[in-house]
Image (spheres, rainbow, N blue to C red):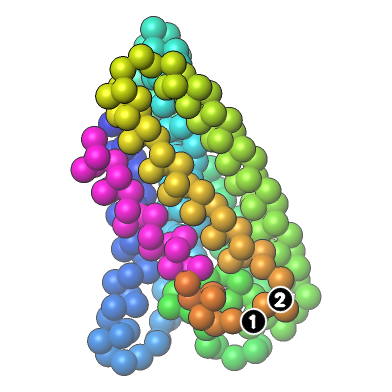
């Protein structure tokens, strides 16, 4: 568990550092400037870190399932080599996911100005600046990514259903409370992340609300990396 928590802490630290410091500096300087390369780097790092974080959270749900439902088989199913492979797979998937979206987004021609209506370089806001129908290619990639994230979310929920069934059979009330205290905050953060990121990237174009876009962006890019250390470090 602590091996995965270490990886999760790295993704949280990186995700916060990708957007918040630049936003704070711009706020202090009363400006909204960012270079083209800086915008490119923000998109790549955010997709990399948030993608890796989500894959790690899915992996951790399986880790909790084995630990609670099949504790005697834990060392067999999740030995050190298996954990290394799972963490490497999460980072690799995040890297490929980020590389695909970044290359596809910044290969588009932009002729609708240079103002991104967000506090960081968010792909849906960047696509609004494109003057080519090629942006539909990136839009379909976002739909495919959302579907994949939703499948992972279903796997995660199924894992927790099995966990809750096992926890309810624990005779000790203190044991049940300890298991729920670890699992429920994890599930709440993942649910918040999945619902907000899917709605932010796939909401209908008829819904034009800068304030809603800002709230959604904060909920998926700032809140999960900020509360995960509280949930996992302090709670444990």
How far across and how far down the image is residue 151, in percent?
64, 40
Q: Secondary structure at mark 1?
A: loop
Q: How many marks?
A: 2
**What is the residue that sits farthest to the left in this orientation?**
234
Q: Is the residue 133 above or below the residue 161 in the image?
A: below
Which is the main secondary structure of the residues drawn in magenta? helix
Please name the residue shown 50% across and 31% down the image.
160
How far across and how far down the image is residue 86, in percent?
46, 29
- Left or right of 16: which side holds 199? right
- Say few, some or many: other residues with alpha carbon within 10 Å of mark 2 (under 14 / 14 to 19 / 20 or more): few
Quarter of the image where one finds residue 171: top left
The residue wearing badge 2 is 205
Report the quarter where the N terminus lies: top left
Q: Nearer the viewer, residue 34 or 147?
A: 147
Please name the residue shown 39% across and 12% down the image.
71
- Say few, some or many: other residues with alpha carbon within 10 Å of mark 1 (under 14 / 14 to 19 / 20 or more): few
Residue bounds of the magenta highlight? 216-236
- Left or right of 225: which side holds 97? right
How far across and how far down the image is residue 136, in percent?
75, 68
The residue wearing badge 1 is 208
Q: Secondary structure at mark 2?
A: loop
Q: Which mark identifies residue 149?
A: none
Please name the residue shown 61% across and 72% down the image.
124
Q: Is the residue 78 above or below the residue 91 in the image?
A: above
How far across and how far down the image is residue 138, in percent?
69, 64
Report the quarter where the C terminus lies: top left
Q: Are marks 2 and 1 in contact (CB under 8 Å)?
A: yes
Residue 138 within the magenta-colored segment of the rendering: no
The answer to whether residue 116 is seen in the rendering is no
């Amino acid at each position: 568990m602590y091996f995965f928590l270490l990886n999760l802490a790295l993704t949280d630290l990186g995700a916060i550092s990708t957007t918040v410091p630049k936003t704070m500096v711009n706020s202090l300087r009363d400006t909204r400037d960012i270079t083209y390369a800086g915008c490119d780097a923000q998109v790549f790092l955010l997709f990399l870190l948030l993608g890796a974080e989500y894959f790690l959270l899915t992996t951790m749900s399986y880790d909790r399932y084995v630990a609670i439902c099949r504790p005697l088989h834990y060392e067999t199913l999740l030995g050190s080599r298996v954990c290394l492979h799972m963490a490497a797979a999460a980072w690799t998937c995040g890297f490929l996911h980020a590389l695909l979206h970044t290359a596809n987004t910044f290969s588009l021609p932009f002729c609708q100005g240079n103002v991104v209506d967000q506090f960081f370089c968010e792909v849906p806001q960047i696509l609004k600046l494109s003057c080519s129908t090629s942006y539909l290619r990136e839009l379909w990639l976002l739909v495919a990514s959302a579907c994949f994230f939703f499948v992972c979310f279903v796997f995660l929920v199924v894992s927790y259903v099995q966990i809750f069934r096992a926890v309810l059979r624990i005779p000790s009330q203190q044991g049940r409370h300890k298991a729920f205290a670890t699992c429920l905050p994890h599930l709440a953060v993942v649910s918040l992340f999945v619902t907000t990121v899917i709605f932010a990237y796939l909401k209908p174009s008829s819904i034009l609300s800068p304030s809603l876009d800002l709230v959604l962006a904060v909920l998926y890019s700032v809140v999960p990396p900020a509360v995960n250390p509280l949930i996992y470090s302090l709670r444990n």
